[in-house]
Amino acid sequence: MKTFDIPVKYKSPVISVIKETRRTKDKLKRNFKPTVLEFERLTILIARHFGFCYGVENAVEIAYRTLNENRGRRVFLLSEMIHNPDVNADLLSEGVQFLMDTRGNRLIDFETLNSEDIVIVPAFGTTLEIQAELSSRGIDPYRYDTTCPFVEKVWNRANQIGERGYTVVVHGKPNHEETRATFSHSTSQANTVVIKDIREARELAAFIRKEKPKEEFYRRFEGRYSEGFDPEEHLVKLGVVNQTTMLASETQEIANYLKEELVNLYGLDESSVSQHFASTKDTLCYATNDNQDATYALMDEDADLAIVVGGYNSSNTTHLVELLEQKIPTYFIKSAAGILSEREIIHYDIHQGKEVISGDYLPESSRPKIILTCGASCPDAVVEEVLARLLELFQEKKNLEDVLEKSLVNF
Ligand code: SF4
C-alpha cells in the first residue's frame, strides 16, 4: 500500500516495529490475534490492527504539504481534518482555520472567502452544495481535496444503485460529516433516506408496508430524505450503503431485515428479489473492517480491562468501544493524560455522552491483562504514550525493547 509523508511527531518507533513485523509475517492479514507484551507486573495485548488508515495519512500529508507550499496565504479546513483532538490542535497552531464545526455550523462567514484563499476538504468529503458555494467564490473545491477514496467509493455505489431505480438507504450517523456528504452526493442521482440504526430500520419498515401515513414519515425522518421523497412511491425498491465507519454487523442486520420485509411484502423468491432489493455488500472501508475484526479477536482474550484511545467524536473508535464493553470493562480515553493514577481514569462514557472519572479501574489481580487499541484517526505516538504511562504506573522493571523482541519472535 502507498506510504505517506506524515509528521514525525505522529509516529512511534515502538508501534512501527510491532506493525511492520506483524505486516511482514502476515501479509494476507489472516492472523487477527493481538500482540502480547508480557511484562513482569502486567500483560499488554495490542490489537492486530489499529491507528492511522490510508485516508487519514493521505489527508494529513496533503494538509501539511498545502501549509508548507502556501506560507503567507490564508488556509482553511472545511471542518475538523479527522476526529482526533491532537491532529486538529496541531493544524490550528500552524495557522489553519476551521470554516465549520463537525455538525456543519458555520464558524466563519463564507462571504469573507475569496479566490486567494485555500480551502482543504477533509477526509470525510463534503456536500455538493458546499462545493458549489466554494466555486462561486472562485475557490476550486477539488484543488486541495483530501476526500478518502473509500468514501468516494460509497458515493459511486449509491449512484449505481440510483441509476438502476433503487432508493438508497444510507446507514450512517445523520449529523456526521461523511454521512451528510454521502447524502448530498446520493440525492443527485437517487431518492435517498438516512437511518442511524436497526431501530430506525424497523420504523422505516412500517412505511414500506404502508402501515403509517406519509405525514408521519416526513415528521420522523425530517431532514433525512431527499427532496420530493414520497414514501408511498419510493420505498418499493431499495439498496443499502453505509458510512464507512459503522458497525459491520449492524449494517448487515439492517440490509437483511429490509430485504426480508420486501420479500414478505411482495412474495419474492431468489430469482425475483432483485426487483425490489439491490444486493450490495456493505461499503465499510478496509480499515474499519480490519479494526473491527481485530477487536473481535481481542474479545476472545481473557483480559481484565480494555483501553481504547481516540477522539471522543470518532465514529470508528466509538464502535470499537461498543464491541469491547460487551465483554470487559472498557475505558475510552483521548490521551495518556486520561490515566490519572492507579486509582482514577478520565474517560468518555458513550452512553452518557460525556467525560467521567472512574475509580478503582485496575483489577485486584496481581498481574493484570490490559487490552490496548485505538481508532483509525489516532496517531501511533499517542498509543505509545499510553503504553509508557501504564508501564510507569506499574513501575515496570522489564525493558520494553526486550519484551518487544521476545514477543515478536513468536509471530
Ligand atoms: S476510516 Fe476508512 S473511509 Fe475513513 S478515512 Fe480511513 S480509510 Fe478512509
Image (cartoon, rainbow, N blue to C red):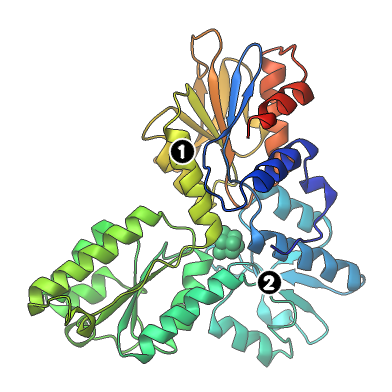
From what the image shows, is residue 372 above or below residue 185?
above
Q: Is residue 80 visible?
A: no
From what the image shows, is residue 15 above or below residue 134?
above
From what the image shows, is residue 388 above or below residue 294?
above
Give the camera-side residue of 211 and 114. 211
Give the camera-side residue of 299 and 202. 299
Kind of residue indicated by mark 1: Ala
As helix, strand or loop, the secondary structure at mark 2 comes to: loop
Residue 148 at x, y percent in the picture: 61, 69
Residue under pointer 2? 146
Image quarter of residue 264:
bottom left
Residue 165 at x, y percent in the picture: 30, 90
Residue 175 left/right relative to 232: right
Q: How many marks?
A: 2
Distance between the Cα atoms at labels 2 and 1? 32 Å
Residue under pointer 1? 297
Q: Earlier in the sequence, mark 2 or mark 1?
A: 2
Residue at x-position 38% and y-position 31%: 327
Marks 2 and 1: which is nearer the front? 1
Q: Dot 1 surroundings within 10 Å: few (below 14), some, or many (20 or more)?
A: some
Residue at x-position 54% and y-position 16%: 368
Residue 178 at x, y percent in the picture: 52, 68
Residue 54 left/right relative to 272: right
Residue 183 at x, y percent in the picture: 44, 76
Q: Is residue 37 visible?
A: yes
Residue at x-position 56% and y-position 56%: 287
Q: Dot 2 surroundings within 10 Å: few (below 14), some, or many (20 or more)?
A: many
The C terminus lies in quadrant:
top right
The N terminus lies in quadrant:
bottom right
Give the camera-side residue of 370 and 2. 2
Ligand 1 quarter of the rendering: bottom right
What label sits on residue 376 in the rendered view? none
